[in-house]
Image (cartoon, rainbow, N blue to C red):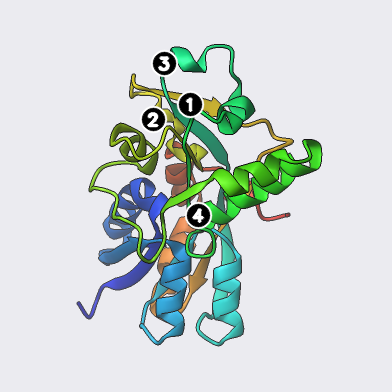
Amino acid sequence: MANSIKVLAAGSLRRAWAPLCEAFQDKTGTKVVTEFGPAGLLRDRIEQGEKVDLFASANTAHPLALQQHGKAREVDAFCGNSLCVTARKGPALDKLNWLSVLLDSRFRLATSTPQSDPSGDYAWQMFELIERRHPGAGEALRNKALRLVGGEKSAKIPEGKLAAEWLISSGQADVFIGYTSYAASLRENDALEVYNIPADYNVRARYALATCTEKGKPLAEFILSETGQHILQNAGFCGKHSVMQE
C-alpha cells in the first residue's frame, strides 16, 4: 500500500496501538500497517534490510542501535512501563508477598526471553536489584525462570490472549513477570492474582520510536503529541515526560 505507513512495533503496545492508529488516520487520512513482535527480533529484521517507516520499541537500546547503523533518522522516548507479578490465584498464595511468590519452590516462574524481548531483559534487571538486597535470591530467580515467550522459537501466544493469562491457564507456569500496562486487564480475570512490585525493586521500561523514513515522521509526531500521549496513558503506560529525563 503505497500511501500507508509501515510499522514494526513491540507486542506490548498492541492494545494501545489500534486506538492510536485510528486517531492518526482520522486526522491525516493515512493508513498505518503494523506488525507486532518481540522488539529484539524486529530490530534484527530491520538491520537485515527490511524496509519500515517507523519502529516502536519497548526499550531505547534497539532504536539507538538502528540509528548508529544508519537505519533510523531520529529516536524519541515516547512512553514508559514497569513490571508486575501475576500468579494463579489460590490458597497457596495466602500470606505471601510478591517476592515470596517469585521465590516459592512450589511455583513455576516464567518470563519473556532476554535479548529477543525487552520484557525478558527487564525481568533480569529486576533479578539484579533483588540480588543486591537479598544475596542469593536474584541468582535463584535467574536459575529458576523459564523463558517461555518472546524468543525466536517460543510458542506463539494465542490471538487476544495475554502472555500471563495464557501461560498460567494452560498449565505451563504458575507465575509470570510482565508489564504493568497489562495489570488492569489481568485483574479482570478471577483466576489470577496480580502483585505490584515496589519502586525500589522495579525497573522503569523506556519505550522509544525509531523514525526510519520521512514517511514515518508524522506518525511519530502524533504519538508524541498530547492526543497520542493521552491514548497511551489510557492503555496503562506512563507518559513521555516520565522517561525523557532518565
Mark 1 / mark 3, whichever is N-terminal? 3
Q: Amino acid at mark 2?
A: Leu
Q: Amino acid at mark 1?
A: Val
In the orientation shown, which residue stands out farthest toward the left?
A: 1
For residue 235, above or below residue 122:
above
- Confirm or deny contact between disc 1 and disc 2 (CB under 8 A): yes
* Label 1 – label 3 distance at C-alpha: 12 Å
Q: Tell me, for residue 186, which label it has, or none.
A: 2
Quarter where residue 59 is shown:
bottom right
Q: Which mark lies nearer to you, 3 or 4?
A: 3
Specify whether 99 is left or right of 218: right
Residue drawn 50% across and 28% down?
106
Q: Secondary structure at mark 1?
A: strand
* Label 3 – label 4 distance at C-alpha: 43 Å
* Residue in the foreground of this view, choosing between 108 and 182: 108
Q: Tell me, for residue 90, which label it has, or none.
A: 3
Give the residue pinned by disc 1: 194
Q: Amino acid at mark 3?
A: Gly
Quarter where residue 138 is shown:
top right
* Label 3 – label 2 distance at C-alpha: 15 Å
Mark 2 / mark 4, whichever is N-terminal? 2
Q: Amino acid at mark 4?
A: Ser
* Label 4 – label 1 distance at C-alpha: 31 Å
Residue count near mark 3 (Cα–Cα under 10 Å), binned few <14, some 14–19, many ≥20: few
- Confirm or deny contact between disc 2 and disc 4 (CB under 8 A): no
Residue count near mark 1 (Cα–Cα under 10 Å), binned few <14, some 14–19, many ≥20: many
For residue 94, above or below residue 14:
above
Q: Secondary structure at mark 3?
A: loop
Q: Which mark lies nearer to you, 1 or 3?
A: 3
Give the residue pinned by disc 4: 225
For residue 57, above or below residue 162:
below
